[in-house]
Amino acid sequence: MYITCLDVEGVLVPEIWIAFAEASGIPELKKTTRDEPDYDKLMNWRLSVLKEHGLGLKEIQETIAKIDPLPGAKKFLDELRTFSQVILISDTFTQFATPLMEKLGWPTLFCNTLEVAEDGEITGFRMRCEQSKLTTVKALQSMGFETIASGDSYNDLGMIKASKAGFLFRSTEQIKADNPDIPAYEEYDELLAAIKKAMK
Ligand SMILES: [Mg+2]
């Protein structure tokens, strides 16, 4: 029994913080884990910037609603879900991803949660578990599933390597060069065919 685990940002939707920085006109929010490797520090800084700009959850969701999934992503996901159970696993937050999940037809999403006050202010965040992608595929395997995984970034390598089959999708030249054993694809058709083949 197979289950497909997909990364979200960079695979199905644009990088949410970068797209949000553009949509909201707050360019400093483009700072990512490449600039600040301490995720907690980065997130606390982002929340302080949102507060400075008077952005609560409602305003953020309205802005994120202007962001679209990557072209072809919904069609890919719809087709994939006809022959495989699919779970999207992301380090982002449910409340940020929700407007994008609506545009993708409400797929199953495992991610993290923002803490929001009654007036809509984002007061904090809660990460679901350590190494959420790897932890999730291992848990699925313990339930009798064989996993197939795909993602574009460093934090996807754990689940990709631990799965029966794993693929890089629209990754960087560096990650592809460092991981020559992992098949890498650029187009949804190729990824769909590779997943289908892995399930045979
Ligand atoms: Mg990604």
Image (cartoon, rainbow, N blue to C red):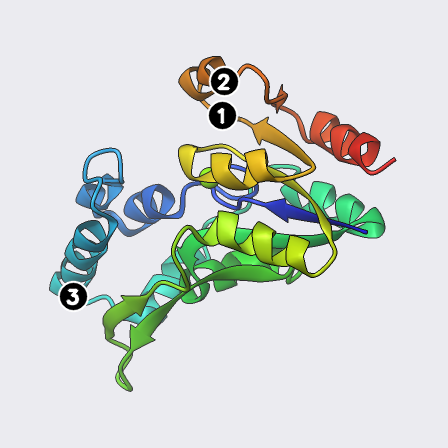
The answer to whether the residue labelled 2 contacts the one labelled 1, judged by CB atoms less than 8 Å apart, is: yes
Q: Secondary structure at mark 1?
A: loop
Visible residue check, residue 169: yes
Q: Mark 3 near ligand 1 (CB under 8 Å)?
A: no
Q: Residue at x 68, y 31 (%)?
A: 188
Q: Which residue is mark 1?
A: 171
Q: Whole-Å distance between the Cαs marked 3 and 2? A: 38 Å
The location of residue 63, given as percent across then percent down, is 37, 58
Q: Which residue is mark 2?
A: 176
The location of residue 129, given as percent across then percent down, is 41, 61
* Kind of residue at disc 1: Ser
Q: Whole-Å distance between the Cαs marked 2 and 1? A: 7 Å
Q: Which residue is mark 3?
A: 51
Mark with earlier residue (3, 2): 3
Q: Is residue 121 above or below residue 103?
A: below
* Kind of residue at disc 2: Lys
* Kind of residue at disc 3: Lys
**Mark 3 surroundings within 10 Å by alpha-carbon count, few (fewer than 14), some (14 through 19), many (20 or more):** some
Q: Whole-Å distance between the Cαs marked 1 and 3? A: 33 Å
Mark with earlier residue (2, 1): 1
Q: Is residue 62 left or right of residue 78?
A: left
Mark with earlier residue (1, 3): 3
Point out the frontmost of discs 1 and 3. 1
